[in-house]
Amino acid sequence: MSTSQQEPGADSAQHLAAQPASPHSDFVAALIWIGFGIAVAIGSWRMDRLENQDVNPYTVPGLLPGLLGIALIFFGLLLLLRAWRQGALDASTPRATPMSAAERRRLLIVLGLCLTFGIGLVGHGLPFWLAAALFVSTTISILQYPQRRADHQVARGIATAIAIGLGAGLAITLVFQEFFLVRLP
Amino acid sequence: MLQGLELLGQAYLSFLNPLSLAYGLGGALLGIIVGCMPGLSATLCIALLTTLTIKLPANDAILILICSYVGTLYGGSRSAILLNIPGTAANAASCADGYALALRGEAGRAIGIATSGAFCGTLFGVLCLAAFTPTLAEVALSFGAFEFFWLALFGVTMSGSLVGNDPLKGWLMGALGLFVAQIGQEGLYAHDRFTFGLHELSGGIALIPALVGAFGFAEVLTTLADPVERKLVELRDSILPRFREVAQYWRTVLRSGAIGVLTGLLPGVGEDSGAWMSYAAAKATSKERHLFGKGSIDGLMAAETGDMSSIPGHIIPALALGIPGSAPSAVLLAAMILHGIQPGPMLMIEHPQFVYHVVAMTTLATICILIFGLFLVRPLLYVLRIKRNVLMPIIFLLATVGAFATQSRLFDVYSMLAIGVGAFFLRRKGYPMAPFVLGLVLGSLLDKSLRRGLVLSDGSVVPFFTRPICMVLATVTIFTMLLYVPVFNRAVKHGTGALVGSLRSLVGRRG
């Protein structure tokens, strides 16, 4: 029996996501929130008030966005104040643990592959099943490469990835397009 | 009353046909499979199935979605027990005791308890759904723009306060969601807001692509960036549901069922709150509280009953008020609108039979999870063995299809990608996604209610605070936010401590 010893409630999603943000990163984020809030408030203030259509002044389109901009500035200021009181500007305050090199490399690879598929491959003439097969096969092959290389099974790994990619592409096309009549990109 | 029972009977009869049963079983099975896989949420499952079932008749599509909703939350307990990773956030409370039981070689028993708790909890919630939805909808008929303004704000504030560990970040996300909902043509004069001349933005940011991005693509990035594979505890003992233990812990089942439904009624709070609050209540009253976190049956039963009973609880405000109780019920609400059914106070007038259909669908979902809990536990465990490197690229494919399918626009795929990348980095910094989703859903209602209210009151904000329901909602909303202010929080704690102390001394003197 194999077990993994983890904290109860540890979640794969939260493993990376739930790392407590440091006061320093909260401070930077607060500045971004305040800047965003100011931009929203200015955008709302400058928005057309439709006076030429003689609309009721209490129903101008920028009313709620403007209030939301003010709310963003207010909450941003609270975050800034909290981070400052927690020592965001103090050099001795520990910074957030940076992503490990392995995590960063995997993230960049996955991000690159997903964006290439979503922006470059889909909806530009290539049949969906083929684009899907290309994406899935490439992603699996690249992500499993270190393990496959250690096991001396690179060729087998690529063949399996191609089979899974083709299977996934064809199955999704069949189920969505033919069975449930949903249009695919 | 009699008319309600007649409609309920007709609703049950309408689902007693092979096709509906097949849809129900299929939806629940898919839900359980998705729930088993750590990281894949009920929100993502329902969002993807919404696009898959878009061409089906409304009742069949909603049946599949409700069955998958119930199935996902039930399936999430498997990975909580066997991997110590909650399949969905709602199953986190089951991890401590479920995994401890599994380590003791009682994984089957833990799954059996989870099945019986889930069955009883959902059934309890269904009874409340049938009893309270028509009543709440009737009350909601008297709501006007002022009340809906506060309801929307209350939902986003509560969601920000209770989801995640940092209310301030929750409120920031809620405000961001409300702002994103303002992008595109506004509802009163069709004026473009924040579109920057892009005609694709005139229609606004669609909910399904946003949800698929926030819960699907962000999860793909999170999971695949993590190089560690988790290992599974083996299952050796019997997995049959333990209804004898339900009888033994009937107080826990009833208490957790009630807590689950009540937390479900609060807009935007999420199923995990139902589970955690039930767990805390069970721990406070249990005779075996020393076992909590070390394999307590009471604790596991409370967590599973609480999270499952909150599902019908979340559907009640979604149907009666048009305000979802959680992120998955927000997608359910969007799916109903896509199928031409507008939830809200007018639902009982326009589609009175639909509420009873939802009751029948949720009952069918409950029966489906019991069937799969009895017969398909071991085969479904193979799902947990699928490598993330294989699964996640396929999930991303489905996310792309899901984002595209509702309106057949490539722009929605780009929205999904942008929101997914943003959500990934925000989650890493501790920003919860549920308040963002609630803001996105309720933004339009908040905007229209505020402006209509101001027209009705001729610019005065007084009615927003003086109408009875507004007064209650405004007080709770403002009080919740003020609790974040340390001075106010200390004063409240001091006040409640003094009150509890004087009550105790009063009871002690009488005793």
Image (cartoon, grey):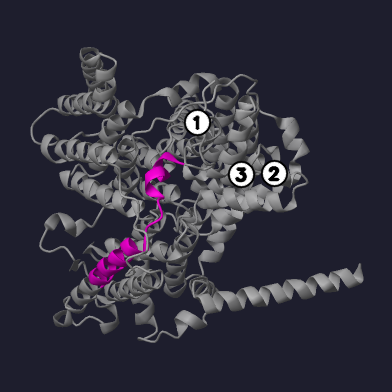
Q: Could one spot residue B55 in this view of the protein?
A: no
The span shown in magenta is A11-37
> Which residue carries the number 2 mark?
B253
Q: Callout 2, which amino acid?
A: Val
Neighbor class of circle 1 (other Cα within 10 Å; few <14, some 14-19, many 20+) is some
> What distance separates the C-alpha of mark 2 from that of mark 3?
10 Å
Q: Is residue B13 above or below residue A72?
A: above
Q: Position of residue B288 (x, y in %)?
A: 75, 43
Q: Chain of mark 3?
A: B
SS under mark 1: loop
Q: Position of residue B459 (x, y in %)?
A: 35, 86
> Which residue carries the number 3 mark?
B303
Which one is in front, B301 or A149? A149
Which one is in front, B88 or B47? B88
Q: Is residue B151 above or below residue B441?
A: below
> Which residue carries the number 1 mark?
A4
Q: Callout 1, which amino acid?
A: Ser
